[in-house]
Image (cartoon, rainbow, N blue to C red):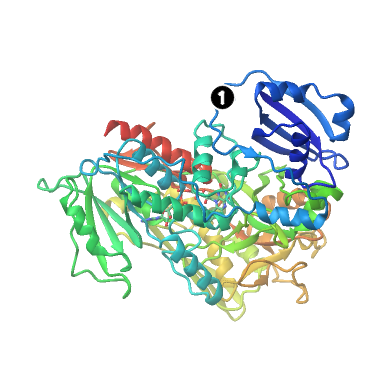
Amino acid sequence: MLIVLRIYLSNQFSIEEHLNEILTSLKIYQYKIIKRSIDARNKAKIIIEYRLLLNEKDGINILNLDEGKKKNLLIQSIKSIEKIDYSYEEYNFNDVLFIKNKIKRREREVKKEKEERAVKVEEVDKLNRINYQNLQKSKNRPVIVGFGPAGIFATFAFLENNISPIIIEMGEKVEDRSKTIENYIKTKKFNKHSNINFGEGGAGTYSDGKLYTRSRDEVNAKIYSTFCNFGAPSTILYDAYPHIGSDNLIKVVSNIRNYFEEEGVEFYFNTKLIDIEENFEKSHEGRWRLKFLNFGQSKIKDLKSVYNLKNYKIKIDENVKYESEDEKNIFEINSDIVLIASGHSCKDIYKVLYKLGAKLEPKPFALGFRVEHPRVLIDKNQYGKFHRFLPSANYKLLFKGKTSNIYSFCMCPGGVVLPSNSEEEEIVTNGASKYLRDGQNSNAAIVCSISNQQAKQFIEEFNNNFLIRLKSFAPIKKSLSFEVGLVSKNLIKLNLDSNQISIEIENNISENQNNFIKAMKESIGKINCFDWEINLITQQIFEKLAFLFGEKNFSAPFENISDFFMKNTKDDERIDDGFYYDEKNNPKIPTTYPFGLYKAKLLKLFPLNIEDDFKAAFKYFDKIINGYIEHGIAVGYETRTSSVIKVLRNSEGEVLEGIYMIGEGSGYCGGITTSAVDGYKIASILAKKL
Ligand SMILES: Cc1cc2nc3c(=O)[nH]c(=O)nc-3n(C[C@H](O)[C@H](O)[C@H](O)COP(=O)(O)OP(=O)(O)OC[C@H]3O[C@@H](n4cnc5c(N)ncnc54)[C@H](O)[C@@H]3O)c2cc1C
């Protein structure tokens, strides 16, 4: 029987203990939580709502509770839900919770209880795992490029169909990747192949591990239970806003890889897909020739084992010129089936696909910054005086502006702001938290939606208004130059000469191939680019300027949110006479961004109408969360909330015959859960055809 139980938050028990107290007093010892959510609309009477699966007898027992007992147990309401499509008996009770009749009443113990909830992932229950047998290893073995959520769940789908794929991953194994990231934070030594974006586990490995998605796909539950079987906390099975936490994610990814290896999946780490060519050699099987660059740490010799397989040919190029000493090998695999699961940050992949004739489109995207607030401010606002008894609070904000929607994204309660760049010379912010979410600050991205048309306008006004905006953004201390574009290359120079600032843009086409030049669209402003490159260029301008103005030391531009409203000229118009910051203006709260901050006027890089929308949005947000303006800082820029490019694919995920694009990089999905679902579904359909 499915029961909806709503209980008032108690100031004596933690939320787990309170449920235990109620059920034990009713002698209900076996139950399953299907869903848990917090209703904090009335902060004086916060309610925890559970959907519980009980057996018939216990269900009737609880429904018949008398009013007096309900009151004593702080129960607001109990009702049953009639229509459910599974019964108590059928349900898999592997993770049924057995109640411990142990009630701790003091706040000190509540804290301890919270710590215990941080699941120890070392001991992973292997019972729920399937052992795949008779794997088909020698025919039509698919190659998966990228081992993030999409690549991981595509692998599960292939294994379920007795097919063992080959996995190529540019970054390091998650254990080594963690050390590399730690080193980056300590020394600013950036590894362009293995970092917060790239490496085993994908972009979200060092994240909050939020799994919430608005999509109600039936595969979502499978994704959650699979994560759980490999060490994620069981709360993700029922919390309304489930999260795994970066501390757990690292171990979960490692457990999944170990399991796949046991099942015969072949991994090549530190290996980047650099090109795909059509294979015209009749003697070679496999439609596509995939070219990989290995950075020397994988055992390239192992690849020779693949020689024995039908459809795969490997050529190790002894004469290749390496980019650096570390890059030891370029090799090729010929294959008919390639699944590209490379995420949205490896831009070279788009270039390769474009060259092969795939159709690329610009996709509306979002631009903004991370805001940080003291965690306790957010918690008190959301939960009132009971915040100490509840997990760190979340929020979701939306303001419909005149030009653009301004909204919060990827909120990380008790989390940190991370340098999430994927290239050497750029600043990109993102957020992460541990499972307990107990850090000093809570952060979220606040972004504006940018339509394809708006991205075009950004580029169009680059030469005139943009210079004014730039001078207002931060002091220009020296001449700067940087390149934007992917297929088309645009060199942007900011010349500082006798206090005169001018912008020069030189277009040069890096690919000296006729079809590229022929296909070049008319120039937009002075920047030449393809339609699908426009968004990428807008994104790059924000990322590179933030880096260059920070003296190239990875410090990020910041502004106190209250300073968004500082009036400089009579009508708070944007200024064209230089930068006007008060030097004493320090961040109002200590940031968690590791490389330090420099002062800037963050809104000035946006067109005026969007700047106005941001300001109006913050005034509105401040009404919802008291102190949001006064106690918040903004750190720039958040540019990678989703893919800015869509690679057109057919209903089965194919972008070119035999080449499939799965996960976030395709532009069809975004976030951990939907990327995992996408990879799983596309590989499942494909596997049945092999
Ligand atoms: C710091 C941070 C925090 C985030 N927090 C959350 C969150 O809490 N919740 C959420 O839902 N989403 C979050 N995201 C977004 C989420 O991580 C992505 O949406 C998701 O990982 C996309 O999955 P994917 O498998 O499509 O691609 P990715 O996870 O990006 O994986 C792509 C993989 O391909 C590899 N690769 C790339 N190019 C090549 C190549 N040429 N050759 C070989 N390998 C290659 C990369 O190294 C990477 O491992 C966060 C992202 C970041 C960066």
Quadrant of the snapshot with the C terminus: top left
Local crowd at mark 1 within 10 Å, few (<14), some, or many (≥20)? few
Q: Which residue lies furthest to the left in this view?
A: 283
User: Which quadrant of the view contains residue 579?
Assistant: bottom right
Residue placed most toward the observer, 404 or 29: 29
Residue, disc 1:
89
Residue 619 visible in the current orientation:
no
Where's residue 624, x and y in %? Answer: 81, 46
Residue placed most toward the observer, 426 or 27: 27
Where's residue 445, x and y in %? Answer: 65, 53
Image vertical order of residue 109 relative to residue 569, above or below: above
Is 619 displayed left or right of 255 in the figure? right
Where's residue 160, x and y in %? Answer: 36, 37
Quadrant of the snapshot with the N terminus: top right
Residue placed most toward the observer, 387 or 507: 387
Residue 677 visible in the current orientation:
yes
Image vertical order of residue 15 relative to residue 582, above or below: above
The amino acid type of the residue labelled 1 equals Glu
Q: Which residue lies furthest to the bottom in this view?
A: 498
Where's residue 689, x and y in %? Answer: 28, 31
Is 165 displayed left or right of 58 in the figure? left
Image vertical order of residue 382 relative to residue 6, above or below: below
